[in-house]
């Protein structure tokens, strides 16, 4: 089941009685979620990603544009008739019901031709529970479960209806770090086993990059970039995308191009032939630094953090903190006043100082 959004817009009326200025939560959103793929909607709080999800589900009405499930126009179709499974951020489990009763609940509300027998409902609930590996917890209540187990119950409840589309609204935000890692791997496994077209909303770029087939980076309701996670990381179209993806985040410098050479401060760091002379913003990924005592980029050394496989060298350049990731096999004398680097060209990005759009070289 592919999901097609054509020029979808959502406008909320202002709550400010004085200004009466409407809020555009989603602005002309056009994208196709491919059949059977897991797509991550990624962006900071308030960027419109959850609103987009709720418009797909039918819980929010669109202000403009169309939504299709394959060739079916579902723009004005009621949420309960769209065949979607929705997992909320807070799980929304019924505390007085057992795990089995929570999973069965959506099936008990089916009517007409969709109505199932008691045995059919139990079979479906057992299958869904087994898929998310909670079949041994069916008689427990939500209060007796861990956060990760509650999350699995919520996913099983969404899957038991055999939805055409699965929608996940920041499903990992209430879990601790270890559980987040484990549960996101489970979500990916479940999605692959079921083949259900899935849309996953998160503000955590690491989550989105680790499990998504495609990511959609959003800012203020507008799509910034769409692509495979690694492609977007390696080839950001603007400064916002470059800064939003990556842990540790990209290092950003004030720079300039003169006679085909890129300067950071007074240091000539890279040949960028073909780029006209101008002031620019420079982004360098942490792994883009090569420690080199004869390197052209000079930074003031402030600290070294050994992280096992890698080493994080913390320094300063023109008053800005620089974090570079160096192989721990490399020896860096912590008593040095300064460190020098050469830069990997494929890890250096130049952006227009005004528009913040990428300048390619």
Image: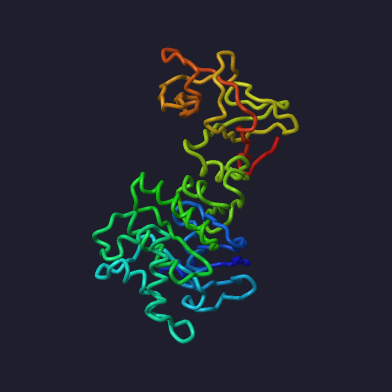
What is the quadrant of the N terminus in the image?
bottom right
Examine the rendered structure and indicate whether residue 20 appears above or below residue 288. Answer: below
Residue 4 location (% of width, % of height): 61, 66
Residue 179 location (% of width, % of height): 36, 48
Q: Toward the viewer: 123 or 183?
A: 123
Q: Toward the viewer: 306 or 103?
A: 103
Residue at 30% x, 61% y is 137
Examine the rendered structure and indicate whether residue 247 appears above or below residue 157. Answer: above
Asked which colour scheme the image uses, the reply is rainbow
What is the quadrant of the C terminus in the image?
top right
Classify residue 2 by image quadrant: bottom right
Residue at 67% x, 29% y is 257
Residue at 39% x, 48% y is 180
Residue 201 location (% of width, % of height): 47, 57
Residue at 49% x, 67% y is 22
Examine the rendered structure and indicate whether residue 79 appears above or below residue 263. Answer: below
257 on left or right of 212: right
Q: Toward the viewer: 257 or 308?
A: 308
The count of marks equals 0
Examine the rendered structure and indicate whether residue 57 appears above or below residue 216. Answer: below
Q: Toward the viewer: 38 or 319?
A: 38
Classify residue 279 by image quadrant: top right
Residue lying at the far bottom in this picture: please name it. Answer: 112
Residue 81 location (% of width, % of height): 50, 78
């Amino acid at each position: 089941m592919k999901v097609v959004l054509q020029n979808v817009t959502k406008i909320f009326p202002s709550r400010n009685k004085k200004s009466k200025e409407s809020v555009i939560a989603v602005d002309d959103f056009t994208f196709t979620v491919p059949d059977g793929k897991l797509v991550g909607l990624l962006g900071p709080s308030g960027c419109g990603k959850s609103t987009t999800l709720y418009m797909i589900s039918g819980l929010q009405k669109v202000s403009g544009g169309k939504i299709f499930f394959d060739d079916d126009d579902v723009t004005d179709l009621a949420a309960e008739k769209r065949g979607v499974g929705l997992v909320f951020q807070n799980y929304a489990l019924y505390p007085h019901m057992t795990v089995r009763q929570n999973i069965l609940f959506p099936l008990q509300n089916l009517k007409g031709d969709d109505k199932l027998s008691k045995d059919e409902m139990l079979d479906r609930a057992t299958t869904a529970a087994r898929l998310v590996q909670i079949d041994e917890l069916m008689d427990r209540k939500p209060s007796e479960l861990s956060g990760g187990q509650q999350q699995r119950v919520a996913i099983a409840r969404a899957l038991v209806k055999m939805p055409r589309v699965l929608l996940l609204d920041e499903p990992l935000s209430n879990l601790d770090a270890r559980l987040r890692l484990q549960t996101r791997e489970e979500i990916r496994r479940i999605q692959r086993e079921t083949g259900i077209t899935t849309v996953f909303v998160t503000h955590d770029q690491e989550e989105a990059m680790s499990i998504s087939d495609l990511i959609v980076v959003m800012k203020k309701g507008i799509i910034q970039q769409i692509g495979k996670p690694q492609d977007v990381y390696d080839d950001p179209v603007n400064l916002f995308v470059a800064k939003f993806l990556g842990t540790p985040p990209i290092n950003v410098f004030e720079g300039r191009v003169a006679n085909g050479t890129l300067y950071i401060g007074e240091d000539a760091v890279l040949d960028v032939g073909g780029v006209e002379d101008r002031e620019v913003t420079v982004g360098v990924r942490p792994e883009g630094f090569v420690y080199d005592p004869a390197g052209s980029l000079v930074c003031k050394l402030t600290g070294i953090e050994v992280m096992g496989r890698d080493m994080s060298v913390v320094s300063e350049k023109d008053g800005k903190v620089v974090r570079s990731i160096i192989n721990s096999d490399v020896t860096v004398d912590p008593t040095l006043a300064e460190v020098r680097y050469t830069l990997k060209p494929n890890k250096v990005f130049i952006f227009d100082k005004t528009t913040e759009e990428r300048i390619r070289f």
